[in-house]
Amino acid sequence: MPFDLVTVTVPATAGHLAVLRTAVGGFAARDQFTLDQVDDLRMAVEEAAVQLLRHSRGERIAMEVETTTGGVQVRLAGDVEPGDPVIDETSFSWTILRALADDLRIESAGTRATIVLDKRRLVDAGVAAPDGR
């Protein structure tokens, strides 16, 4: 199965978060995620983007959504102050993200912070998996 990659870059403003939610929702729905999983991804992307927006020192937030073997990986990135943790791992936001994503991590390189969310695809009993099984 070929892997798809979609990249969306929006201004670092609250008014553009809906674009990120819509893009990830459409990607996941097309990739045979359940409706609940699509909603989880939309909420996770919005929560992660809000955290980046709160700490943003740049003009843009970039999102990459990529098909993986078992689901999708979403990478949200923005420029922040060097050493800024973006999300405190004891915060309510981190708890929300952990509940919505199957795997979650933050990567930092200089002023660039990236929140990485992985979501595995669940297959309904009545729907064939993407590989036909």
Image (cartoon, helix red, strand yellow):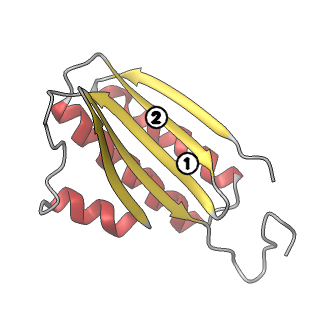
For residue 101, say whether it is visible: no
Q: For mark 1, does the 10 Å Cα neighbourhood hold few (<14), some (14 to 19), or many (20 or more) residues?
A: many
For the point 58% across and 54% down, which residue is it? 72
Say which mark, if any, is on residue 3: none
Q: What secondary structure is marked by label 1?
A: helix
* Residue 21 point in image, percent of width and height: 46, 42
Front one among 85 and 26: 85
Image coordinates of residue 132 in percent, x first then y, are 87, 69
Q: What residue type is labelled 2?
A: Met
Query: Disc 1 marks which residue?
Result: 25
- Location of residue 97 with respect to 14 vertically, above or below: below
Residue lying farthest to the right in this orientation: 132
Which residue shows up at 81% across the image and 54% down it? 1
The mark tally for this picture is: 2
Residue that badge 2 annotates: 63
Image point (55%, 48%), residue name: 25
Which residue, as the protein is rendered here, is positioned at the far front? 109
Residue 109 found in image quarter? top left
